[in-house]
Amino acid sequence: MGNWLSEREQRLVAGAEAASAATPIPTQIVSNGEYLPPPQSATQKRVEARLNELADANAARLGLNRRQFFRTSCGMAAAFVAMNEVYGGNVFQVTPAEAREPELAQARADGLSGQFIFDVQTHFVRDDFEHKELLDLAKFASVNWNKKLAEEGVASLGRYKFQNYVKEIFYDSDTSLALLSGAPFDDPTWWFLSNEQMAQARALINGFAGSRRLLAHSLIIPGQPGWMDEVDKAIAVHKPESWKGYTIGDPLNPSKFPWRLDDEKLVYPFYEKAVKAGITTICIHKGLLPPDYEKSYAGVWQYATAQDIGKAAKDWPQMKFVMYHACLRPAFELPEQAWGEFEQTGRMKWVSDLAEIPQKYGVNNVYAELGTAFANSAVSHPKFCAALVGTLIKGMGADHVLWGTDSVWYGSPQWQIEAMRRLEIPEDMRKKHGFAALGDANSMTKQMIFANNALGMYGIRLKAASNTKMPAYSEDRFAALKKDYALAAAGPSNLRYGYVRAD
């Protein structure tokens, strides 16, 4: 794959902020620069066209232009109406009336105002991230894609940084609590955030809010020099809520340091330390390899599969193993082929392997997280998205699936929250594959996925919040400022951050 986008790939993409339509939900896959996004499909173009038609018709009734309409709750509803019409199957629970009657949209929003959302995978990059490869990409974009970047300079990368992270996560979405994550590279200067910086961000946000709004990872890098010393430091100083690791070693290139979860000599001593310290949740990046993964990651791609999870989970029942991205392999291309394979076999590459681990190994400590896998499939093939969620719940149980968005790579996570709230597995798929219904926006299944499972995992009791020194989430400083922000703001920007395939 190379470091970020190659020169050839740069000529094939455009800046998402300017080139993608400011629709409530993306109508094509957005890349954060780590991979080449696929072109907008003919079906996605039909969704965009139908959404524009609905916007023009309903915006006129409300005295709004198209862009203003897209920033309303009616505009969000119209996006799901368009996807249902084009993709078929009524995967999303929405009525055409919601797209034209603000009262219905507001009533729905009011009914969900108390829903707690715990996002277990969020990101931002440090202020001094200065690798020239990434900065050169921004400069190229300022000349060729987005003239506004030329005015702002490379500081426009601030869209990925702390201040905008707070805005997108805590003000422009219904997210209540977030877990800050990171990514390791063989070259440590490429790290988005160090373990120390993640801990500092947690302290800053929680100190400002007056409540526990942010949790933090510490990264582990098995096999790299001094990695166990860094584990000791994390335990003693940073005190992370959980660990994060990449068994493939490096998310961008074949690594010198891939590793397996079930490596008794290398990794089991780490589990022993983690258990002794009481930090017993480990989150692992799995899947998310490009279409040519066997070539691009020759010699190491097997480390991104689910093959090393079962034994480790069985040997270490004290640990909780959370598989980020639900092990989904085909995340960065349109899932047409993957959908065809699922229709024929009832299986999804690597996802089904993950879902079968509890029964195969007799374990109850393996979990699936939905970051990026949900986002990309929801906008490119809703039926595949429904099958993804159905497969995980069928094999692992609704109490073992966690909500994560991989934000802020894709802008505000609000559109993902709305997609999950409205998602339903069509009846014919439920009958054919033995899937359970997901229920309405506030069903017990969705409450478990959105928050309850992670709250239990991290030992957070919402009902006890008012009995501690910290206020309830609805009463802290963020809650008060968000109310003022909602009154002053015209609505979410609907901007995507990153790159889309140019026509």
Image: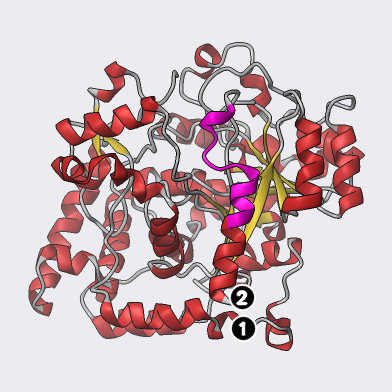
Q: Quadrant of residue 335?
A: top left
Is residue 282 placed above or below 228 in the rendered structure? below
Please give the name of the residue rendered at 32% of the width and 71% of the height, measured from the top-left corner.
95
Q: From where the camera sits, is residue 90 visible?
A: no
> Pointers 2 and 1 in contact (CB under 8 A)?
yes
Q: From where the camera sits, is residue 8 visible?
A: yes
Please give the name of the residue rendered at 24% of the width and 25% of the height, measured from the top-left corner.
12
Query: In the image, residue 369 lies at what x, y percent?
Result: 61, 49
Instruction: Using a 10 Å C-alpha cutoff, classify the residue at mark 2 as few (fewer than 14 neighbours), some (14 to 19) or many (20 or more).
Output: many
Placement of the C terminus among the 4 image quadrants: top left
Looking at the image, tell me whether mark 2 or mark 1 is earlier in sequence order: 2
Please give the name of the residue rendered at 43% of the width and 32% of the height, measured from the top-left corner.
332
Decide if residue 211 is on the left or right side of residue 75: right
Q: Is residue 324 magenta?
A: no
Is residue 206 placed above or below 330 in the rendered structure? below
Q: Pick whichever, 87 or 289, lies toward us.
A: 289
Q: Is residue 192 magenta?
A: yes
Disc 1 designates what residue?
A: 472
The three-letter code of the residue at mark 2 reads Ser
Query: In the image, residue 16 lies at what x, y percent?
Result: 26, 42
Decide if residue 363 is on the left or right side of residue 76: right
The three-letter code of the residue at mark 1 reads Ala
Disc 2 designates what residue?
A: 211
**Numbered range of the magenta stretch:** 188-200
